[in-house]
Image (cartoon, grey):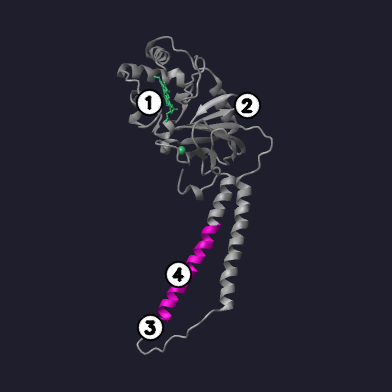
Amino acid sequence: MTGVVTLNPFSPQAAAISHLFIAILIILGGIFLLVTALVIVAIIRYRDRPDAPEARQVFGSHRLEIAWTVAPILLLALIAVFMIRAIEASDPPVGDEHPDIRVTGHQWWWEAQYPSSGALVANEIHIPVGKSLLVEVDSADVIHDFWVPELARKIDAIPGHVNHVWIRADRPGVYQGVCAEFCGAEHTWMRLIVVAEPQADFDAWQSAQLTNPPTPKEGMEARGLQLVKDQTCLNCHAISGLPGHKNIGPDLTHIAGRQILAGGAASNTPENLFRWLKDPASIKPESHMPNFQLSDDSVHALVAYMETLK
Ligand SMILES: [Cu+2]
């Protein structure tokens, strides 16, 4: 994310919103300058002077009144036309297409499923570059709002109701997304990233998401796996190949391949993973991930195992 995102669109939808913003800024900027100039002229030209006669008094002017009524109406009509065009461009109609991605908001992380392949990921969405994908958005708990400013409009994530938004990136890159509807204590750290990449890279990424991670047989990694089974991790987290899938917390099958942790509260490094598993609140105070009061040794084992989940 560089500069002012509104001025930095990477899709036709985002460009429509950006152009609307600039058009309105120019119109309103013009009005502001005009009014300021008139006020300055009036202050200087009609100031009180010692021997000046009393100024001419004017009571009502039909011409002026019509002008200052009609001009704003025309300007507002013009803005309305711009707005309707931007709405049409930023919100293409949804027919009976099937969604390419199903996004579900959770306090405070994003789940994303790819229905055609079955891939399930969290907080990091990959898309092929130059293609419009239909995203179906809903929520598992409270109202959230899915927003990737450089790529698309905002869309509310509402429990029990699906909304749709098109997402597209015309240039490869990593785009930042946020939750744009206040949803509780950790709303700030409910971010996501969208990685737009060439189709072949996307296909490779998607098939990698579908593979089961290897099962470590010995060493720290095996101890870590045992801890995952012994603690209640699998009541809340899915790891393909292990029993007890639930989506209370992010899918961990390929956690090591992700760039961010805990909705962007930390980057995904082994050190941060250690801090997270030792005490989630040290990274995200109100997160719904419990503190298991594990020894440093156990946490090291967990990190070693998680690092194999590529
Ligand atoms: Cu939120």
Question: Which SS class for mark 4?
Answer: helix
List the residue tagged with mark 3. 48
Q: Report the Cα–Cα distance between label 3 and label 2.
A: 77 Å
The disc label shown at residue 116, or none: 2
Taking depth in this image into account, of 70 and 197 the one nearest to the observer is 70
Label 4 sits on residue: 36
Q: Earlier in the sequence, mark 2 or mark 4?
A: 4
Work out how far the residue at label 1 is from the one at label 2, CA to CA, in angstroms. 31 Å
Pick the residue in front: 203 or 246.
246
The amino acid at mark 1 is Leu
Q: Residues within 10 Å of mark 2 (few under 14, many from 20)?
A: few
Q: Which residue is mark 1?
A: 273
Residue 154: x, y in percent?
54, 43
3 and 2 marks in contact (CB < 8 Å): no
Of the numbered discs 3 and 2, the one sitting upstream in the chain is 3
Q: Amino acid at mark 2?
A: Ser
Local crowd at mark 1 within 10 Å, few (<14), some, or many (≥20)? Answer: many
Query: What is the magenta range?
Result: 23-47
Q: Is residue 205 magenta?
A: no
